Amino acid sequence: MTNKMLRLALFLFPGQHLGAWRLPDAIPEIDLGIEHYVRAAQLAEQAKMDAIFFEDQAAVPRSNEILKGDTYGAANPRSIHFDPMMLLPALAMKTTHLGLAATSTTTFNEPYNVARRFASIDFISNGRAGWNLVTSFNESEAQNFGLDAHMQHGARYERASEFVDVVTGLWDSWEKGAITRDKERGVYFDVNKMHFLQHEGKFFKVRGPLTMDKSPQGRPVILQAGASEPGRELAARTADVIFTLQTDIAESRLFREDIRKRAVRFGRDPDKIKVLPGITPIVGKTDQDAADFRERMKNLIPEDLAITHLMPHSGGINFRDYDLNGPMPELPDTNNGKSHRAAIMALARRGNLSIIETARTFAEGSYMKMVGSPTTIADTMQEWLEADACDGFLAVPTHFPAGVEDFTTLVVPELQRRGLFRKDYEGRNFRENLGVETYS
């Protein structure tokens, strides 16, 4: 047994599973339906989860296959979704403890805007904001921001490293108690507790400060995912929460150990960094019920859509030039999506899957599948925690509402019964509930 407690976040993104939205009881209108997001957030909070998290892609995905007229590209539900930053204030008004995290890219934004937006959300939510720092990997996004191709991988991370330093510097530009609003003296803020950043670097020149006080958490929580060398370095230096695509318990333990060692090198307490592998829970009354349900959903994924979905990670390979029932060819290294490429190759090799089997499995979502009864899924989660392979999990349901309900009302209570997860929130804000570094 372990005395450690799991950290749990809910990742809600329409179309993570490319077939589940077609189930009769699924509500695909969650893509642009705020009332459904509110319901999902409230379910997560009732389960005492740490956070709800939203991905973002500022483009409709378009692989070469779609450009050539593959109409199955139009069947991809991941194309339609809100700007996640717009969701957070609405959810803040309907929840009280749940962390609220959204993706914002360092490649197609300016640090002052990002710092200001997340600090604003932190005030609106009373200390529950989280920024998922990404460099983007979708070539289509670049074409929406004046570029023909994505910035090179190394340059993206170099820019991101400076970007996050500017953002955190801006978050620290006011000391606690700087805003006095002293009516008697006629003094609104203490000038001595306000600091100009005066940053001048390779990518950015930013004066500062922000137009608001120090945020309730001191700094919003920083979340990140990245398995490449520069991605690991940046995460170990700056992130509070690190999402991973690990599917093997031994590899995940090595990843976590690597991050922790790097964190020590940067002078950080490794226990204040939480590594959360992504999981897709598929829950049934019995293990067989869950396995049957998985196959039912997988069969709802059109073959051409599965191949099209895999194409952006192919490194230029056209899978239709190969026998789709044959083995997955070695994918070349590319400028984009290195962690996804590694996950695809590991998936194909470990399961000895054909191209089409790999494509269909990847179209279920790129995260580890946990399939079974609530007891079986809790067993696996406990095994990973006790093996020091993680600090918790990012739960990625297949669809709304049943996928969200099954995890929050069936799996989480089983974890609570075992003493592996909280029964109530302990802290005043997102950072305190997570057990990450705090800022005064």
Image: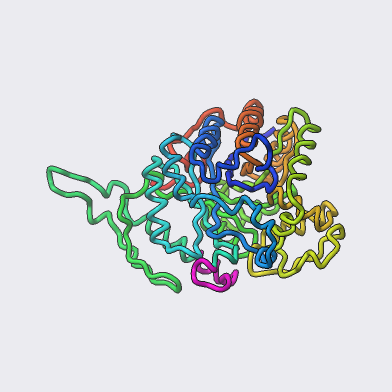
Q: Position of residue 256 (x, y in %)?
A: 65, 51
Q: Quadrant of the N terminus?
A: top right
Horizontal side of residue 29 vs 199, given as left or right: right
Residue 5 at least partly seen:
no
Q: Position of residue 136 (x, y in %)?
A: 56, 62
The residue sitting at 64% across, 40% down in the picture is: 399
The figure's colour scheme reads rainbow
The answer to which quarter of the image holds residue 258 is: bottom right
Residue lying at 46% horizontally and 35% vertically, measured from the top left: 97
Numbered range of the magenta stretch? 143-160
Query: From where the camera sits, is residue 295 visible?
Result: yes
Say if 3 sits above or below 328 in the image: above
Q: Residue at x 38, y 61 (%)?
A: 112
Instruction: Answer with left or right where residue 236 lies relative to residue 215.
Output: right
Does the magenta run of residues contain 149? Answer: yes
Residue 111 lies, in percent from the top left, at: 42, 62
Return the residue nearer the eye: 151 or 417: 151
Side of 399 where 209 appears, left or right: left
In this rendering, the answer to whether 265 lies above or below 12 is below
Q: How many marks?
A: 0
Residue located 50% across and 32% down the image: 425
Residue 333 located within the stretch drawn in magenta: no
Residue 65 horizontal side relative to residue 100, left or right: right
Instruction: Name the foreground residue: 218 vs 282.
Output: 282
Q: Is residue 314 positioned above or below 387 on the image? A: below
Q: Which quadrant of the view contains residue 151?
A: bottom right
Residue 103, horizontal then vertical, whole percent: 51, 53
